[in-house]
C-alpha cells in the first residue's frame, strides 16, 4: 500500500491510501530497417542486428580517431590570400542571392 497526504471522507487532512492507476498495456512493434550505407565508415548495414553491432562504442571511437588523424594531415589548397578572396566571393554571392536573413519581409 502507498499513502499520500490528502483529505479523508470527513474532509480532514491525513494520510490516505493512494488510488491505484489502471495499467495500460501496449504492444511495441519494431519493423526492420532498410539497408543503408553508413556515413561514418561506409559499411553496409542490413538490419537492426547489424546496426547494433555497428553502433558499438569501440568501433566508433576507432573511427573517430582515424578521422582525426586524417584531418590533421589535410592542408588547405592555395595561399592564405587566395582562401580569403574565395571566402569573400562566396559571401558576396550569398548576399546577392536573396537568401540572407536580414532582408525585409
Image (cartoon, grey):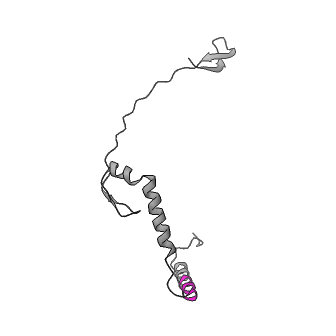
| Residue positioned 66% across, 11% down in the render | 10
Residue 87 among those drawn in magenta: yes
Pick out the residue farthest to the right: 13
The chief SS type of the magenta part is: helix
Relative depth, front residue between 52 and 62? 62
The quadrant holding residue 15 is top right
Estimate the x, y position of residue 9 in percent, counting from the top left: 63, 12
Residue 64 among those drawn in magenta: no
The quadrant holding residue 40 is bottom left
Residue 96 drawn above or below residue 69: below
Q: Which quadrant of the figure contains the N terminus?
A: top right
Q: Which quadrant of the figure contains the C terminus?
A: bottom right
| Residue positioned 34% across, 61% down in the render | 43
| Residue positioned 64% across, 14% down in the render | 8
Pick out the residue farthest to the top: 10
In this rendering, position of residue 37 left or right of residue 64: left
Relative depth, front residue between 36 and 52? 52
Estimate the x, y position of residue 19 in percent, counting from the top left: 55, 20
Relative depth, front residue between 23 and 69? 69
Q: Which stretch did the figure color magenta?
A: 79-88
Total count of labels: 0
| Residue positioned 58% across, 88% down in the render | 81
In this rendering, position of residue 19 left or right of residue 35: right
Estimate the x, y position of residue 91 in percent, counting from the top left: 55, 80
Estimate the x, y position of residue 25 in percent, counting from the top left: 40, 30
Amino acid at each position: 500500500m502507498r499513502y499520500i497526504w490528502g483529505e479523508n471522507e470527513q474532509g480532514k487532512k491525513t494520510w490516505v491510501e493512494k488510488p491505484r492507476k489502471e495499467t495500460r498495456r501496449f504492444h511495441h512493434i519494431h519493423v526492420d530497417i532498410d539497408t543503408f550505407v553508413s556515413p561514418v565508415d561506409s559499411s553496409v548495414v542490413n538490419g537492426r542486428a547489424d546496426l547494433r553491432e555497428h553502433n558499438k562504442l569501440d568501433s566508433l571511437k576507432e573511427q573517430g580517431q582515424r578521422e582525426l588523424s586524417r584531418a590533421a594531415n589535410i592542408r588547405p589548397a592555395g595561399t592564405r590570400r587566395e582562401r580569403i578572396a574565395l571566402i569573400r566571393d562566396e559571401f558576396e554571392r550569398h548576399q546577392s542571392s536573396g537568401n540572407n536573413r536580414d532582408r525585409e519581409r
